[in-house]
Amino acid sequence: MKTILYLHVQSLVGRAYASWHFIPSLRVPMLFRTFAALPLFAVLSLTFLNLTAPAAEPTFSFTVLEIPDIQRGAGLAIVMRTPSGKTWLYDTGTAHPEKLSSDGWLANFNAGRDLIAQHLQKEDITSIDGIFISHAHYDHFGGLLWLKDNFPIKLLIDCGYIFHSDVEADYLGTNKGELDHYTRVREEFRSRGAYLCATAGETLKLDPDLKIEVIAPPKTWFTAPHITTRPKNDTPSHFLVNANSLMLRIQFGDIVFLLPGDIQTEDIEASLMPFVDKSKLKCHILVAPGHGIHPIPKEFGAATHPEVSIASVFPRYAKGIRSTKDLQALGTKTYVTGLHGNVHITTNGKTYQVTTDRDDTTKPPASVTKPAPAAAK
């Protein structure tokens, strides 16, 4: 097709030049006629060169944003951009409604407004194709509360889980109002036909560039295992909502990303591993479950065996999270947003590149107090 186009262009130039050069009635000097035809040929030749230039290599970008410490929740927000121009989010970071705050948000912060919207605007992104919400805790869906009223969002996807208990003490970990708030948001999207419920075993055909598989939870969801070692404040409204996080396996070309949400160590061992097809856990890039705060179970680590892991947690916790050593023992290169800032991965489907805003891994933790210098003698 390109060769035919080139010949056609040559033919057009030749005919145009010939017509102009040999029609006596034009009475234009031959030298002028000869050079006047050259710009036409140059324009057409440049057009041909542009048409034959190799197309840019399609890439998939995956960015884990750094969520600041507002003393409530760790937060997770991931922005994904595909070659076809689609934009997907997995969780939307921290935001806690606060009536006493001047802007209605605790610490005057909403990740949707203050991080995600700014990131999208820098990339000239004006709408969001879909938002996956892992579970109904404010540090994961809080940013959506602002985004839904200020940014076009085509689809909300979650697993449909709703925690309910008649035992008041079960809500000590996460209050009922927080969970109910997310249920209202879900219903808002459902009412306008912009909601999708997804559970284990489904492949979501949402984007031609991505293979998106739902790994967990099952359609009947995970129930509370009989574990007696949990802290007293880790009640079912917290750990069971975490356990039923929407876990995704996202593949672009040969490169696999695993996004497990906030499922905790005990529930990985007791609920996930007996249920899941372990071959589906193998990945190149792992978003550390539960912000990387908890240990990585050996069976889960062996099954995932990631080359890269990313934990979303603020500097106050960054160097003390327990997943880092477990993953490094597997040979994994570990990144923590509290130490590295935004973590950005770009892949062509064969290889990938990781870039970060900074590297604070050699700096002492912020809570360390250096000894005072010795008094001069």
Image: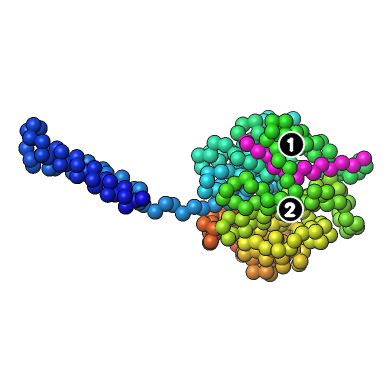
| Magenta stretch prevailing secondary structure | loop
Q: Which mark is residue 68?
A: none
Q: Does 264 sit left or right of 365 as displayed?
A: right
Percent of width and height locating residue 183: 78, 36
Task: Please tell me which residue is depicted at 82% across the width and 57% down the height of the picture.
Answer: 271
Q: Amino acid at mark 2?
A: Gly
The front one of 278 and 22 is 22
Q: Amino acid at mark 1?
A: Arg
Residue density around tag 1, few if under 14, some if 14–19, many if 20 or more, within 10 Å = many
The front one of 174 and 56 is 56
Can residue 265 be seen? no
Q: Does 171 sit left or right of 279 as displayed?
A: right
Q: Nearer the viewer, mark 1 or mark 2?
A: 2
**Residue 164 magenta-drawn?**
yes
Percent of width and height locating residue 159: 75, 45
Q: Does 8 sit left or right of 208 as displayed?
A: left
Report the quarter where the C terminus lies. Answer: bottom right
Q: Please, is residue 318 above or below residue 103 in the view?
A: below
Task: Please tell me which residue is depicted at 70% across the width and 63% down the height of the picture.
Answer: 279
**Residue 165 magenta-drawn?**
yes
Residue at the extreme right: 167
The front one of 59 and 52 is 52
Residue density around tag 2, few if under 14, some if 14–19, many if 20 or more, within 10 Å = some
Q: CA distance from mark 1 to mark 2?
A: 22 Å
Q: Give the secondary structure at mark 2.
A: loop
If you read the primary sequence from the N terminus, does the residue marked by circle 1 or circle 2 appear first? 1
Percent of width and height locating residue 17: 17, 41
The stretch of residues the image draws in magenta is 153-166
Q: Which residue is mark 1?
A: 186
Q: Which mark is residue 201?
A: 2
The front one of 305 and 13 is 13
